[in-house]
Image (spheres, rainbow, N blue to C red):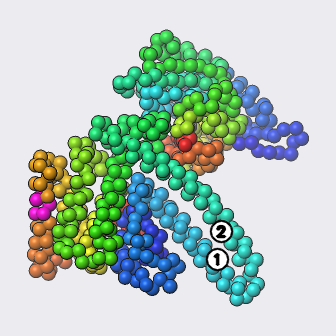
Amino acid sequence: MATTTTTTTEQTTHFGYQTVKESEKQQKVREVFEQVAKSYDLMNDAMSLGIHRVWKDIFIERLGPTHGMRLLDMAGGTGDISFRYLKYLAKQPNPEQRSSHVTVSDINQEMLNVGEARARQLGLTVDQLPSVASIDWRCADAEKLPFNDDSFTAYTIAFGIRNCTHVDKVLSEAYRVLQPGGRFMCLEFSHLENEAMQWLYDQYSFQVIPPMGQLLAGQWHAYQYLVESIRRFPRQDQFKAMIEEAGFVHASYENLTFGVVSIHSGFKL
Amino acid sequence: MNCTQLIDQNAQGTFLAATCPTARTASSLHTLSSQRRQRPLTPTSCLTRNYTKDTDKLEEFRAREEQRERERDAAEQLAAKKTQSDAGGGGGGAGAGAGLGGQQQSHQSEEEAGKQAKVDGIRQKILDAAMEHVPQHGWSKQAIVLGAESCGYPSVVHGMFPEGGFALVSHFNGKCNAELVQYLQHQTDNGQKLDVGDPLDFLVRAVRKRLEMIVPYKTQWPQAMALIAQPQHASTALAQVLTLVDDICYYSGDRSVDFGWYTRRIGLATIMKMTELYMLQDTSAGHTKTWEFLKNRMDEAVQLQMALAQTEGMTHTFQRSFNSAFITARNILGLGYSRN
């Protein structure tokens, strides 16, 4: 969320607990993710003690993919959500032989490279997939999507939206590329309701995660930015209001793990 | 806010308005003394129930009622302020300021209400279309997906119904209950005709009419009953059953204000459930055996009541246990608090 100051040339925004110019934020976020891309999945497992896998499983359960769906997985980088989507579809019977699609998109090419390598390893590339689902990897900026209007039936963004400079632009772009009846879903770190638990969570985030990042990935400041950016993200209700402002209806959210992460959802009707 | 005012608000299809027997009977008798109320009461306005929102969660219903309460309080304060300023002539500015604020708030909530109504309309449309797929796919997410696609929506909108098959079941139940209420209103001139002949016969006819609506989905009905029995759906299911039973008893002419009000409704609900279960395994032509079963259960209930009336001490115990069962049900629904 941009904060206006009285600078003559441009507005500033937050980068973790620092204040930077809006034009700089995108570059700084890009640098962070370039540095962490190689060890991203390892660090996710270490930081969340493996629970992030459960969160993402629940996220896909809530989406409930059906055959014929066209998913845009934004900030999908290393492909966690997309692979789960394909595995879920593979388990569903497909009597009418409908074909589905997922486009994995990320602003950072490094993250997409890691994702494509994982896909090759898991046997989920274009030539190896069953003919019912196709996967596409595109480098794109969430605030300016290179896709046509009404071209997807579902849009997911997992752990990515808090890194975007203009969240409202991301939401309105999501609204644009979704078909009428399409669903927007966002999985993101959020705020705990219980103050004592929030304190515990803060201690863990600030005292444990950056040193862990230094030990396992050699990156202290990147992980410092990550935990700070979590605190700068709007609260559940505020984000729900932002989703409604973008034009989505039937907006709702569901807290997981007492509010450590939250699944927000809205429909374009 | 007392029960009469709750009914003024045209409570939407839950048991809330009906848990005060005195208010319901009193309000229908006092239609002429409308001058003292803020809105004139007509029999239809206090007796009609809007069943289209049966799939709403109770929290949303309560939030809506509380919002209306607040708006009415604000309007009352405004009216009080206005009378004060009219008398005094000095507080006109304050009154106008409060009036504008109240107007803005009502615009916003009107907009939200409009959006909500649009979403509800789409939900109804999808569920109605999904009903056609129930015989083949059961009360399930698959039926909802097919219904949505036949309406022209992508399959992903099934996410609007997180409770899955139960959303279909409660939608169907709500529709059937509304249809039954219309039939009963037609039979009794909107509850005005208190003499409906033999009340027992009336009850049997009403229950029979309601159970006959299930017949087209009879093969899938066991699945529906299993969904209703699940604890996470208990509050909605209970609300629907109790509202239905209350409606039937009311139109049969029951204007009692004693414990009999509770016992009659609980008794009728039990008989309805038993007959429903019997019907599922009944293979006779036109379900004649089921209607016989129903008549026998009703007769037994009457006999039980007469036997209890003859042993006064025991009656009190039974009445108290029925009463406590009823209060437990209310607490499950979260309606146990006093609103006075």
Name the image quarter holding the C terminus of chain A.
top right
In the image, what residue occupies the spot 51% across and 66% down? B66
Q: Position of residue A229 (x, y in %)?
A: 66, 38
* Residue B231 shown in magenta: no
Name the image quarter holding the N terminus of chain A.
top right
Query: Tag 2: Cα neighbours inside 10 Å, few (<14), some, or many (≥20)?
Result: some
Judge whether residue B224 can be spotted in this image: yes
Residue sitting at the far right: A8
In the image, what residue occupies the spot 69% across and 37% down? A169
Q: Let me know if marks 1 and 2 both belong to one chain.
A: yes
Front residue of A67 and B44: B44
Judge whether residue B317 can be spotted in this image: no
Q: Position of residue B302 (x, y in %)?
A: 13, 71
Q: Amino acid at mark 2?
A: Gly
Q: Amino acid at mark 1?
A: Leu
Q: Secondary structure at mark 1?
A: helix
Please, what is the dominant secondary structure of the magenta stretch?
A: helix
Q: Are marks 1 and 2 in contact (CB under 8 Å)?
A: yes
Q: Secondary structure at mark 2?
A: helix
Over which residues does the magenta segment extend?
A: B292-296
Disc 1: host chain: B
Residue sitting at the far bottom: B87
| B118 sits to left or right of B264 | right
| A109 sits to left or right of B221 | right
Q: Position of residue B317 (x, y in %)?
A: 18, 74
Q: Give the residue at mark 1.
A: B78
Lower position in the chain sequence, tag 1 or tag 2: 1
In the image, what residue occupies the spot 34% across and 41% down? B132
Q: How many marks?
A: 2
Q: Give the residue at mark 2.
A: B102
